[in-house]
Amino acid sequence: MPVESGAGIGQPKRLTVLSGPSGVGKSTVVKELRRRHPEVWLSVSATTRAPRPGETDGVEYHFVDDAEFDRLIAENELLEWAEFAGHRYGTPREPVLERLAAGQPVLLEIELNGARQVRANMPEAFLVFLAPPSWEELVRRLTGRGTEPPEVVQRRLETARVELAAEKEFDVTLVNTSVHEVCDELLGLMVAPSA
Ligand code: ADP
Ligand code: 5GP
C-alpha cells in the first residue's frame, strides 16, 4: 500500500522514527511530547521482554510470549522487528499504515536495526537520532534509572557504543540535554518541513 508520497523538501514528514542508545531518554521525551501534543500518534510495539514496574500491557508495549512473537513475524504483521538485549521488539504494521493513511503524524520509538528496516522499506520516513550530552551522562542515566540489573545495564552499554557510531545514518541528531527543548525540536521536525 502506498503510504505517503512526495515527502520531499517543503512537505511534512508524517512518519518519524526516534532512535538512540538505551538510557538516552527516548521514552521520557516521547512521554512529554505525547502529554503536550496528544495529536501525535505513538506506535505501541510488541515485545517479549517482561513489563517493568508501572508498565501496563497495551500502553507502553503489547507484552507477548515467544510463540505470539513468532506468529506476528510469520503472518507478516510487523513493519519491522529486531532483537535487543536478549528480547524481541517489533512494530505492528496495520495501525501505523492506518494512521498514515488518515494523515496523522506517526512516531516510532525503536532501536537502530529497526530504524534501518524502516529506512529501507519506507524511504519517506524521517529518522531522528537522540544523542546523550556525553558518554558519562549516558552511563549515569542508564544506571540511575535502576530498572535493570548490572549485567543487563552492561549489555545495553555495549550495544550503545554500536548505536552511537550509527548517528550519521540518521537525517538529524538531537542532543537530549533538556527534555523540554528536545520535545520542541522534535515536534518542529514532525509537523514542519525540514531543511
Ligand atoms: P530510553 O527510553 O532512551 O531508554 P529513558 O527515557 O528511560 O531512556 O531515560 C533514562 C533515564 O534518564 C531516566 O531515569 C530519565 O528520567 C533520565 N533522563 C531522560 N532525559 C533526561 C534529561 N534530559 N536530563 C536528565 N535525565 C534524563
Ligand atoms: P526497552 O526495553 O528499554 O523498553 O527498549 C529497548 C530498546 O528497544 C529501545 O532502544 C527501544 O527504542 C527499542 N524498541 C522498542 N520498541 C521497538 C520496536 O517495535 N522495534 C524495534 N526495532 N525496537 C524497539
Image: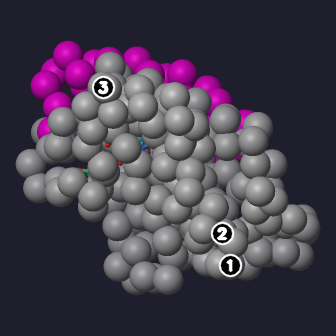
Image position of 63 (left or right of 192):
left
- Magenta stretch holds residue 172: yes
24 relative to 165, above or below: below
Residue flagged by tag 1: what amino acid is it? Answer: Gly
Instruction: Using residue 101 as the reference point, say whether residue 90 is left or right of it.
Output: left
Q: Residue at x 25, y 31 (%)?
A: 65
- Mark 1 neighbour class, 10 Å CA radius: few under 14, some 14 to 19, many 20 or more: few
Q: Is residue 99 above or below residue 55?
A: below
Give the numbered dot on residue 66: 3
Q: Which mark is residue 103?
A: 1
Under circle 2, the secondary element is helix
Task: List x then y, in percent, for residue 33.
Answer: 43, 73
Q: Residue furthest left?
A: 53
Question: What kind of residue is marked 3?
Answer: Asp
Look at the numbered disc 1 and give the secondary structure of its residue.
loop
The number of callouts visible is 3
Horizontal relation, residue 171 to residue 110: left or right? right
Q: Report which quarter residue 87 is drawn in.
A: top left
Residue 132: image x %, image y %? 46, 45
Q: Quadrant of residue 141?
A: top left
Question: In the rendered structure, which segment of residues is drawn in magenta?
Answer: 147-173
Q: Nearer the viewer, residue 190 or 65?
A: 65
Give yes or no for residue 164 being in the magenta stretch. yes
The answer to whether residue 181 of the structure is visible from this angle is no
**x and y, in percent, of residue 124 in the image:** 80, 56
Image marks 3 and 2: residues in contact by CB distance under 8 Å: no
Disc 2 marks which amino acid? Answer: Leu
> Which residue shows up at 71% across the image and 56% down it?
126
Tell me, yes or no, whether the two marked residues, 1 and 2, touch with CB atoms within 8 Å. Answer: yes
Say which residue appears at 59% left-offset and 71% top-offset.
99
Return the residue at label 2: 100
- Left or right for 53, reference 57: left
